[in-house]
Amino acid sequence: MADTLTREATIEADGLRVSVDLAVHIASLRYFNADGVFAAAVRSVVGMALPGVLQAAMGPASWGAGAFTLAWRSPTETLLLGVDGERFSNVVAALADAGEGCVVDQSGGFRVLRVCGERVFDLLARLGGSASAPKIGEGRRSRLADVTVLALCVRPEETLLIVDRVYAEHLLTWIRETAADFATP
């Protein structure tokens, strides 16, 4: 099935902007021990420790060239996000042989929607409830528009929604309909 999402799939309403971010690379880091050999390898290669429950660790130049974000997804999985394709590939390769864990490039399987503006909380609350809206440095996995989404707040008034690629268009449709309610008459 062809991926129909493009950068042009932007939604704008009063106090809200939602866009598809095709530049973000995503890998799933899977492990059994968050303090074990694999976790040490992640810390050494990425320069950050695996985040705690519902947390995210963002590099010093968040979303700048070469910066990474680690987002807790479950007790045995953390997502690695980055925008520098070459550096991302190097990190994935470096972690491939680390013991007690594995890394799987999921860039083709996920889509990232960048939600910005003063109405981010309002949108997330309407799509999935107020518990769906993360604070800065948090990652909240919940159901938005009836699909599982990881919402990651990267800075004030900016949240990334990480969704399985096959559900991205569905989520965007719900966002488009909900954002229409935000328009001032």
Image (cartoon, rainbow, N blue to C red):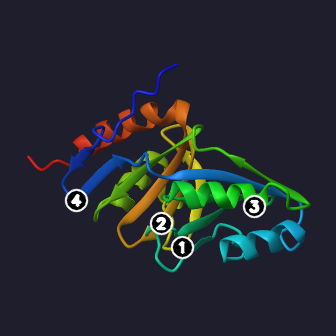
Mark 3 lies on a secondary structure that is: helix
Residue designated by label 1: 137
**Residue 179 position within the rendered picture, expressed as x and y whole percent measured from the top left:** 27, 45
Give the residue type at disc 1.
Gly
Residue that carries the numbered disc 4 in the rendered image: 15
Mark with earlier residue (3, 1): 3
Amino acid type, residue under disc 3 in the picture: Ala
Q: Residue at x 40, y 49 (%)?
A: 21
Pinpoint residue 70: horizontal percent, then vertical percent. Answer: 63, 66
Question: Where is mark 3, residue-wise?
Answer: 94
- Please tell me which residue is depicted at 63% across the width and 59% down the height of the picture: 80
The reply, left or right, for residue 96 in relation to residue 124 is right
Q: CA distance from mark 3 to mark 1?
A: 26 Å
Q: Which residue is mark 2?
A: 153
- State which mark lies toward you, 2 or 3: 3
Residue 104 percent location from the top left of the image = 73, 47
Mark 1 or mark 2: which comes first in sequence?
Answer: 1
Mark 1 or 4, nearer chain start = 4
Amino acid type, mark 4 = Gly
Dot in front, 3 or 1: 3
Question: As drawn, is 179 to the left or to the right of 47?
Answer: left
Element type at marker 1?
loop
Identify the residue at horizontal 63%, vertical 70% (top origin). 55
Residue drawn at point x = 73 percent, y = 55 percent = 93
34 or 180, nearer to the observer: 34
Q: CA distance from mark 2 to mark 4?
A: 17 Å
Query: How crowded is the residue under tag 3: few (<14 C-alpha within 10 Å), some, or many (20+)?
Result: some
Question: Which residue occupies the extreme bottom position in the image?
Answer: 60
Asked if the residues shown at circle 1 and circle 2 are in contact, with their CB atoms under 8 angstroms apart, the answer is yes
Q: Helix, strand, or loop for circle 2?
A: strand
